[in-house]
Amino acid sequence: YLDNPLTEDNKLIISDRRISINGSISTKMANEITTKIDYFNNKDKSKPIFIVIDKSPGGSAMAGYLILKAMKGSTAPIYVVLREYAASMAAIILTLADKSFAYAHSTILHHQPLSWNVGNLTEQREKLKRLEAWWTEFGGATAKKMGITLEEFQKEMYKNNSKGDWEELAVNAQKLKWVNHIVDTISDTSVLEEPQKVEPKEPSILSLLNFEETINAKGEVVVYLPRLSPADSYLIHNPDGYYQFR
């Protein structure tokens, strides 16, 4: 295991102390990630742990919070690696990591949390307070790392996009301090078995995470998100309504 996994020719070497984030971030995923962080720490507290994001639109605020707390509590250094796309909660995990790496043309997207609140006026006010608390926690920490205020961060979001979806390629996001290092290549030494050449039916990432695609009453392909706990919210990029509630 390398103490410094970044080589002189700008190649990142990922070891088998590796954790994946793919698809929507759920409580189940958070529990698996925090358990693996504990496991790798108990095996060796000095060697790096890699959290690799291939493609994630974000997900549960509480799940992301648990992952960030586990990262902060880890004695072993944790490096977050982006290969393709990180939005919302996934982007926050990447940005708030002590050390992060990304391909130059991978994409990072930050935005304010969305609300699907229902209920009477008092209930909606209560839910809005919780949503604001999550945004203060995550948006405030992200703004602080950028060296600006939360209010300035919000203004920049809407300056870049009318929906507030601030999207940047990693090569530009590095200047904003959303990611630390831009790498040319990534070598994943954790791959020790040859992938199967023929798959009868390869399960999708969503299927593996219990987020099954289905057809709604309008004939649209959608994924129904699981019900959250009362104090939780979703930090997920959902511009086309692909993620829905029953």
Image: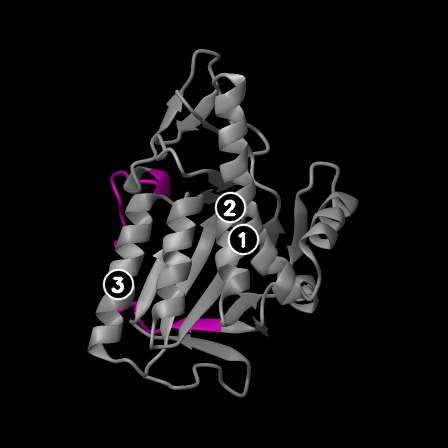
Residue count near mark 1 (Cα–Cα under 10 Å), binned few <14, some 14–19, many ≥20: many
Residue identified by numbered label 3: 36
**Residue at the spot x=44%, y=57% of the render?**
53
Q: Nearer the viewer, mark 1 or mark 3?
A: 1
Instruction: Verify CB contact (< 8 Å) between mark 1 and mark 2.
Output: yes
**Residue at the spot x=42%, y=51% of the render?**
64
Most common SS among magenta residues: loop
Q: Position of residue 103 (x, y in %)?
A: 56, 65
Quick one: 36 or 52, which is closer to the camera?
A: 36
* Above or below for 130 versus 183: above
Quick one: 210 or 131, which is closer to the camera?
A: 131
Real-space Cα separation, disc 2 to disc 3, in angstroms = 25 Å
What kind of residue is marked 3? Lys
Q: Residue 134: which numbered mark, if any?
A: 2
Residue count near mark 2 (Cα–Cα under 10 Å), binned few <14, some 14–19, many ≥20: many
161 part of magenta stretch: no
What kind of residue is marked 1? Phe
Q: Position of residue 174 (x, y in %)?
A: 65, 67
**Over which residues does the magenta segment extend?**
186-206
Q: Quadrant of the C terminus?
A: top left
Q: Residue 138: which numbered mark, if any?
A: 1
Q: Residue 153: which numbered mark, if any?
A: none
Real-space Cα separation, disc 1 to disc 3, in angstroms = 23 Å
* Above or below for 161 versus 148: above
